[in-house]
Every structure is written in structure tokens, then in C-alpha cells.
Amino acid sequence: MNAACGTTLADRLADAVARINAPDVVLAVTRHGVRTVLTGGSALSPPTPRHALRYELGSLSKTFTVLLLAELARAGALALDDPLSAHLPPDLPLPHPHARRITLWHLATHTSGLPRIPADLVAGALLRPYDNGYAAYDTERLLRTFARTRPRNRPGTRWRYSNFAVALLGPALSQAAGAGYPALLRERVLGPLGLTGTTLGPGATGTDAVGHRTNGVTPVASADMGAFAASGAVRSTPGDLLGYLEAHLSPEGTPLSGPLRDVQVPLLRRGWRHRHTHTLTWYHHPAPHGPLLFHLGATFGQQAFLGYHPATHTGLAALATRRGRTCRLTDTAYDLLYALAGEPTL
């Protein structure tokens, strides 16, 4: 806990931690670069302190992948409006006309028309929700499945959240830049931002948080995302996540200033009566003094939230080793960040 942020903020964080129902909980706030981190949970403290563990980010990984996309676009390796097919094997058959019209922009913004997950994963996900169907799903299978998938609507006409779509950015970015997705992410995003505690796989024994089922007791195996790495494989420490948020809040102080600004520009409206705004990768909601940007993530046994409010230079990372509505992480984190957005900072 950082006394420089004041007792009031620390007390509010402690109250929020207590409302989140999970074995391990971390809430971390940065305000004008001053950090406050509180931890708690229903389980005994692990041997490695909770604030030092690496947590599975699930769909929050998409923000890292799309930042990589924006960086490669700035570097001239690709263009956001490039057809996806231009960065896939040339002999891949694409019989559905809509599939040939999908661009990298469509994939990033969930407007490709592709379903949330491939059809061949649906039955297993419904019948065995804690079995990891992603682990055995390699890139060759991902591309074959894409080739035979008919988009549900013409690209660019409807917002439909899709792990499948962002997963395809992995091989597309690799083809465009001539290196594997893990190497590209390390060299073009994680390294320049100094995120040394962020990886695409497990770390050394004892450094990774252990997820749990919805009962909060039964442990869940570490999530191997296979070819869906671009959609959900990133793991990170609370400290790195604060650094990631601070980079978005102060892009000009980083080597990725252009891409960090690009991913925050409002691009489309979605939802009922188009009430909700979306950037290239972040949800974009109205808040006091200016917009609030955020994203959620979950794996089979963990849950995460990242959000920031540029007007007050405030960022919040929330992590829990349990997922589901009864965890209450998402609502608690969002409400806290919204409240902080309405308060003046020093």
C-alpha cells in the first residue's frame, strides 16, 4: 500500500477487495503514476505474495495483440484494411465470398461476421466447460476451420464478439512480419514497454496464480490456448499491468506512442440503439470528465479487468483466481474505476 495515495483510496480498495469472492484477489490502482496495490481473498496467502504472481488474462490478451497490430501497421508491415487472406497461405481455399472480404480491421473490432468460437468447439464447451478444447487446436486446424466457416453476416455490418476472429490475427501477423506471434509480441510490445513479467505461457514453479472453479475450491489446470494464443494466452503480474495502463495513459513517454494512441480512438458504435462505443480494441464508455476505457478477461479458473480514465490519469487492474458472476470482480472493479473517474486528483 502506498501512503502517498492517501488513506481514503486504500480504504476503498480494501472494501472492494472484500466484496470480491475469490481465493486470491488483487486490486491495483495507478493515479498520475502513484501506485496502490491491495490483495486479499478467501484462501491462505500463497508462498509467493499475491501481488508478485503472474495471472492469466484471458480475453485481455486481445488488447496486447491489437496493440501489436497497430504497431506493425505504423511500421508499414501491413495495413489495417488489408484482407486477411493476403496474410494467410495462398493455397488456403476460401469458398465463401464474405470470408475473402474480411480485413485485419474487422478481426480486431469484432466485425468480421465470424462466430465467437469455431463450431467444432461448441459441443465440448457446453458439455465439459472445464475441459480445455483450445490446447489441442493448432494453427493448421484453425486455418482449415476458417476456410470452411461461412461468416454470419457481411464483414463490417455487425459487431459480434469473436475469439475465433482475433485468434486469426496470430498467424496473419506472423505471415506479415516474418516471425512467430510470440516473438513478435515480445520484441514489438512487451520489450519496448518493459513488461518483463508478462508471458504467453507458465513461468517457473510457484510464480503463477492457480485458478479455481466457480465453487472457489477446486483448482483448475493452467490454460494452454493453442492456436488461440492471440485471443487469450497472455499472463501478467499486477506490476506489469500497471505499467501497461500507464503506457496507455502517457503514450508520449513510450517507444509505442503512435500505436498506443491509435488503439484508443473511437471507431464504431454497437449494441442496442448503438449506445456503446468501441475503439480498435477497448470498450469506450462515457464517464465524468471524459471517456473510460476497459476490457475484461477470463480463463477456465481466473478472471481479470483492466480499465483507465485518461482525464484523471487513473488506471485500475483487478485480478481473481475464480471466475463467474458470483465472483463479483467485474462489477466491483468497474464501479470503483467509474467512481474514481468522478473525483479530482492531486
Image (cartoon, helix red, strand yellow):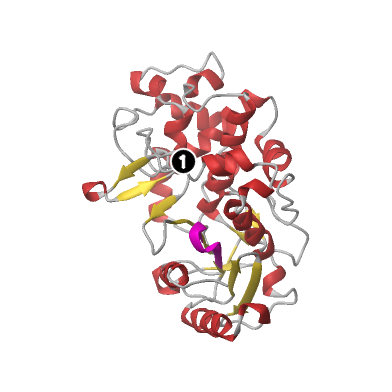
Q: Residue furthest top?
A: 91
In this rendering, position of residue 48 left or right of residue 234: right
Magenta span: helix, strand or loop, mainly? Answer: strand
Q: Nearer the viewer, residue 7 or 321?
A: 7
Report whether residue 228 is seen: no
Q: Residue at x 54, y 65 (%)?
A: 316
Report crowding for label 1: few under 14, some 14 to 19, many 20 or more residues within 10 A (C-alpha): many
Report whether residue 30 is seen: yes
Q: Quadrant of residue 24?
A: bottom right
Magenta extent: 308-318
The C terminus: image quadrant: bottom right
Q: Quadrant of residue 114?
A: top left
**Residue 115 in the image: x percent, y percent?**
37, 39
**Residue 123 in the image: x percent, y percent?**
38, 47
Q: Residue furthest left?
A: 273
**Residue 127 in the image: x percent, y percent?**
39, 55
The N terminus: image quadrant: bottom right
- Give the labeled residue for mark 1: 280
Q: Nearer the viewer, residue 269 or 346?
A: 346
Residue 315 part of the magenta-drawn span: yes
Q: Is residue 167 above or below residue 250?
A: above
Q: Residue at x 70, y 46 (%)?
A: 190
In this rendering, position of residue 321 left or right of residue 107: right
Q: Residue at x 68, y 49 (%)?
A: 253
Residue 48 part of the magenta-drawn span: no
Q: Is residue 204 above or below residue 81?
A: below
**Residue 239 in the image: x percent, y percent?**
68, 64
Of helix, strand and loop, which one carries label 1?
loop
Q: Amino acid at mark 1?
A: Leu
In this rendering, position of residue 338 left or right of residue 88: left
